[in-house]
Image: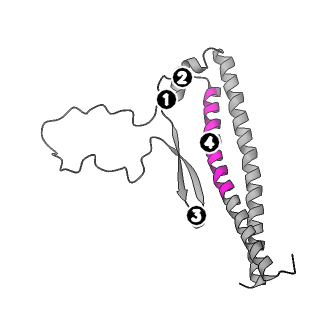
Amino acid sequence: MAAPDLRAELDSLLLQLLGDLEELEGKRAVLNARVEEGWLSLAKARYAMGAKSVGPLQYASHMEPQVCLHTSEAQEGLQKFKVVRAGVHTPEEVGPGEAALRRRKGPAKTPEPQSSEAPQDPLNWFGILVPHSLRQAQASFRDGLQLAADIASLQNRIDWGRNQIRGLQEKLKQLEPGAA
């Protein structure tokens, strides 16, 4: 590869890296704002309901996650992170429960109670009529989770870009030993 082509590719990678860094800075600021907003809303809920009404004693004894973090390989081996609700089935999981034929008419079976398909809303631990500030805190922290996954994906892309730039700089040094 010729030196002008390497320089053009290096320039485009540098521009992409700078754009990614700017986006990372913006997302980190938004994440900090969401987390701060969540804690402030939680404090408002504690004030409205009482300090002992919103605390660890109200947590369920058996907690199930509301969201899961999925990773996937993107182009050039980059990992992307995505937050997915825990009750949502992936297309591979959706299908008949058994592979045999079903009898459509016949003795009706009582449906077996299945374990909770979708996780219970944690706000119900604190009562039925919870303050709006508690719902706002939950929404803020959910937004923060999504932003954290986006930031992790962006950070991986930035690291990949830095490695690509270093590789191109080494190639350029080998082609032009006098110019550095």
Label pair 2/4, CB-CB below 8 angstroms: no
Q: Which residue is mark 4?
A: 145
Give the class, few, some or many, for how many residues have Cα within 10 Å of label 2's Cα (few <14, many ≥20): some
Label pair 2/3, CB-CB below 8 angstroms: no
Residue 170 showing in the rendered view: yes
Q: Cα distance, mark 3 to mark 1?
A: 34 Å
Give the class, few, some or many, for how many residues have Cα within 10 Å of label 4's Cα (few <14, many ≥20): some
Q: Of callouts 2 and 4, which one flags the residue occurring earlier in the amino acid sequence?
A: 2
Q: Residue at x 74, y 39 (%)?
A: 33
Instruction: Give SS at disc 1.
Output: loop
Q: Cα distance, mark 2 to mark 3?
A: 40 Å
Range of magenta residues: 134-156
Q: Residue at x 54, y 27 (%)?
A: 123
Amino acid, disc 3: Gly
Q: Which residue is mark 2?
A: 59
Amino acid, disc 4: Leu
Q: Residue at x 80, y 77 (%)?
A: 173
- Name the quadrant of the C terminus: bottom right
Instruction: Give SS at disc 3.
Output: helix
